[in-house]
Amino acid sequence: MRYTLNQDSITTIAADCLVVPVWKDGETGDAVEALDEASGGMLRQIAGSGDFRWKPGESHLLHEPAGCAAKRILLLGAGGPAGFDATAAAKVLACGVRKLLDGNIRHAHFALEDIEAVFGGGGGWLAARLAREVETAAYRYAATRASTGPEPVLESLSIPPIGDGPAAALARGEAVGRGMNRARELGNLPGNICTPEYLATYATELAREHDSLSVDVLDEAQMRELGMGCLLSVAAGSVEEARLIVLRHQGGGEEKPVVLLGKGITFDTGGISLKPGLAMDEMKFDMCGAASVLGAMAAAAELRLPVNLIGMVAAAENMPGGRATKPGDIVTSMAGKTVEILNTDAEGRLVLCDALTYAERFDPACVIDIATLTGAAVATFGHEANALLGNDQSLMDELLQCGLACLDRAWQLPLWDEYQKQLDSNFADMANIGGKRAGTITAACFLSRYAEAFPWAHLDIAGSAWLADGARKGATGRPVPLLMEFLLARADQS
Ligand code: BES
Ligand code: MN
Ligand code: ZN
């Protein structure tokens, strides 16, 4: 897709389609006024006809409109200008983009000026969001099936030069959208294709494509050398070897790096503590944390973000088998603490704990881990919120704020000491599960014991990373927007 700025007057823009938002009750903005005048009053007549309520989702397409150079005008319901917030704006942009991609339109111009005039969030936000919506709406999963229906034909999209730096905003939105699509594609790929080795190869390719990126992949022998008994215990039942992927983006001089760490369980059967069969296929999505790290790293590299960044992926497949770890087995983590594995299905924290210890060597500014860690997070938040816990309130406040800004929202849960005792074990330094209650919190308690050396935040994305229902089933690309918002803010570019 090509994104451009066009500051010509709207009546002279020779696009295949002009997208023009119309307020509820036919109230009109400048773009509508200009087109109305050129067409001899046609637009106001339609806008105010009472045939449409101009709610988000409603639209009306005009062919060969009089008095303007464009072939079509898509009048797009924008709802009420009162209370037109980021949620409303995102909805309107998404509707417009969907209509454009469904239509036979190659070159479009989106008249953002009328919504910018009432929107408090800035023109840059609108521009970035529009580009992101275009990228994500054009995504099709095609890796393992014949094409499903017509491909979008849209080639270019222009906007008026709104806000400060609209071109950079478009580029940001495009990169975020592309990063989300990478995460979705990796998430959607089946477990027999997207293995730990596949993720390692993917990271290696990324590093080859971008000068700022370099990669290091640890195999099982190297992990054994380091004493990563927890991580290795998860992979023990699988013929797929575990991988610890370390992808660096060097963009910010001598500053301490931000470390992003993703859970990369490429399939989670539960191991010997086998999961029930119902919907077990969804456990191919158990590497969505890893996918979001790779998507964000790619986006950061594409944007040449001036931050130092390390993307880590702890990748393994959790399978039952003759060599699989058994309930009651005790393993030693790289940090030297012993863990009684009471449930082999609580494997995410086991791969992450050794990776957290490994992260200490980077002397991180902070570590954010991203993991489809607990079913309890789905029970608590459904698909809406990323669960957030951690040991540093200012880091968490930063993430909460970023979530609000990009609408990839997080909600904090307490990590009080009182919960820690649920991990007590009679036979080891700790157990890997904390019983039935407060599952998202006790999982984070386990991780917290390995994150004492740096500011740390944990995002449990079990609810937000994919949708399970019907036609919409698939990875969402979250929380790439949240991670990118955070990185852009740290780079002073949001
Ligand atoms: N990957 C799952 C978490 C999960 C389950 C995410 C369902 C989304 C939907 C994780 O490895 C897991 O199995 N967690 C267990 C932990 C329990 C054994 C303490 C869970 O949440 O049931
Ligand atoms: Mn599990
Ligand atoms: Zn899992």
Image (cartoon, helix red, strand yellow):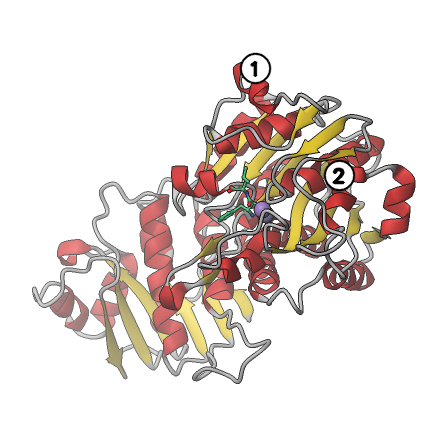
Q: Tally the numbered discs.
A: 2
- Which of labels 1 and 2 is toward the front? 2
Give amino acid for label 2: Cys
* Residue 341: image location, x then y, percent: 67, 36
Q: Is residue 308 left or right of residue 341?
A: right
Which mark sits nearer the N-terminus, 1 or 2? 2
- The disc placed on residue 76 is none
Q: For disc 1, does the CB lie below 8 Å from ligand 1? A: no
User: Foreground: 436 or 315?
Assistant: 436
Residue 235 visible? The answer is yes
Q: Which mark is residue 417?
A: 1
Horizontal side of 466 relative to 456 (left or right) equals left
Q: Nearer the viewer, residue 84 or 204?
A: 204
Residue drawn 43% across the image and 84% down it: 149
Q: Within 10 angstroms of label 2, few (less than 14), some, or many (20 or more) residues?
A: many
The residue most toward the top is 418
Element carrying mark 2:
helix
**373 w.r.t. 139: above or below:** above
